Image (cartoon, helix red, strand yellow):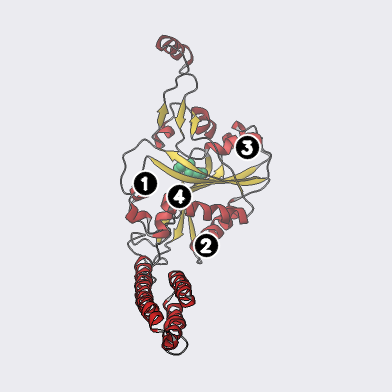
Amino acid sequence: MTKDIDIKRLREDALKSIKAAADAASLESLRVKFLGRKEGELTKILRSLKDFSIAEKKKIGPLANALRQEIESALSEKLKSLQAASHKLQADIDLTRPGRKVQRGSLHPLTSVEKEIREIFKSLNFSVVEGPEAESDYYNFDALNIPKDHPARDMWDTFWLRQNDGRTKEQKNKRTKRQGGGERLLLRTHTSPVQVRYMEQHKPPFQIIVPGRVFRYEATDASHETNFHQVEGLMVGKDANLANFKFVIREFFQRLFKRKLSIRLRPSYFPFVEPGLEVDIQCVKCGGNGCNICKNSGWLEVMGAGMVHPRVFEAAGYNPRDLQGFAFGLGLERIAMIKYNIPDIRLFYSGDLRFIKQF
Ligand code: PHE
């Protein structure tokens, strides 16, 4: 009778531990524990059968044998299911597979060049100033010594803005006849209007740069866009002069292109400077020997500049007898094209990933 109960307990114990086994090694030790040839718990029961009566043997023998089979198949079932689970795990996690790349954006080449330019000028003690893109006729032209109807206005092809100020067509026409159109707004054709805006609010000496977006109403081609960027520069003081300009601008280009280079100043005309200059730098690709970038001249034209015209100082409320200064304006796209060897200005705005992913 007691053997009866022993077998029942043994069965419960064995099946429970087999079910809970976590791996093949623990299954093996369970096999040894229950079915081991010497010390296996079931083996011991079977071995002791010889001491029992015939009737007991007949009863316990088959029970014990059945349990032996039950344990064996439970063990092999469990082993199979453990193996299947580990195969599944291996299929789900392929440790040899390359990791998924983190998608990271990068700065547009114009943004990074502008950032670099800002940093260089800041390190030369220039402040960075900005101004409005929709500008008045006055700041974009008149205050810069470009009077209405003066031919110099033809240097800039302008987007004029139609203003919705609540006046009817008739009222506008009346006003147009009497007052000559009033103050019109336009998309600024250059960053120079910020010169006057800044001078109206600040006392010299100072030195600023003005990065910003500008607009011109013209046909696009490899070197012209209707929308592009400039960086204006202005330094005003008691005796800020062209020698200072030459130093600052050469220093700037050398830091930007990370090499020693010569600059060349040529006489030119802009209504808001006198004298006016065109600035060339030694070709950064060939060093001046002549190549396709500089069209074999050895020089790259990079900016307009000059000494601030007395009329501009007057427009800003300064007395031109007390002050002098220089101004310059460079095209950001042009600089980026030279720096990165970009052949066509339209690529900057094309949204073409093949272009943009190179930076
Ligand atoms: N504003 C001029 C242009 O857009 C460039 C310039 C700036 C020239 C300052 C002289 C001085 O062409």
In the image, which disc is placed on residue 349?
1
In the image, which disc is placed on residue 332?
4
Secondary element at tag 2: helix
The residue carrying pointer 4 sits among few (fewer than 14), some (14 to 19) or many (20 or more) residues within 10 Å by Cα, namely many
In the image, which disc is placed on residue 330?
none
Callout 2, which amino acid?
Gln
User: Does 270 sit above or below residue 178?
Assistant: below
Report the mark closest to the observer, 2 or 1. Answer: 1
Report the mark closest to the observer, 1 or 3. Answer: 1
Q: Does the residue labelled 1 lie within 8 Å of ligand 1?
A: no
Earlier residue among tags 2 and 1 = 2
Q: Along the line of sight, which residue is nearer the eye, 59 or 153?
A: 59
Earlier residue among tags 2 and 4 = 2
- Circles 2, 3 touching at the beta carbon (< 8 Å): no
Callout 4, which amino acid?
Leu
The residue carrying pointer 3 sits among few (fewer than 14), some (14 to 19) or many (20 or more) residues within 10 Å by Cα, namely some
If the image is split into quadrants, where does the C terminus sit?
bottom left
Callout 1, which amino acid?
Tyr
Report the mark closest to the observer, 2 or 4. Answer: 4
Real-space CA distance between mark 3 and mark 4, rounded to the nearest whole angstrom? 23 Å
Q: Where is residue 107 in the image (x, y as percent from the top left)?
A: 46, 53
Secondary element at tag 3: helix
Q: Position of residue 334 (x, y in %)?
A: 41, 52
Earlier residue among tags 4 and 1 = 4
Q: Along the line of sight, which residue is nearer the eye, 115 or 45?
A: 45
Report the mark closest to the observer, 3 or 4. Answer: 4
Real-space CA distance between mark 1 and mark 3, rounded to the nearest whole angstrom? 33 Å
In the image, which disc is placed on residue 199?
3
Earlier residue among tags 3 and 4 = 3
Q: Where is residue 11 in the image (x, y as percent from the top left)?
A: 44, 73
- Circles 3, 4 touching at the beta carbon (< 8 Å): no
Q: Along the line of sight, which residue is nearer the eye, 355 or 322?
A: 355
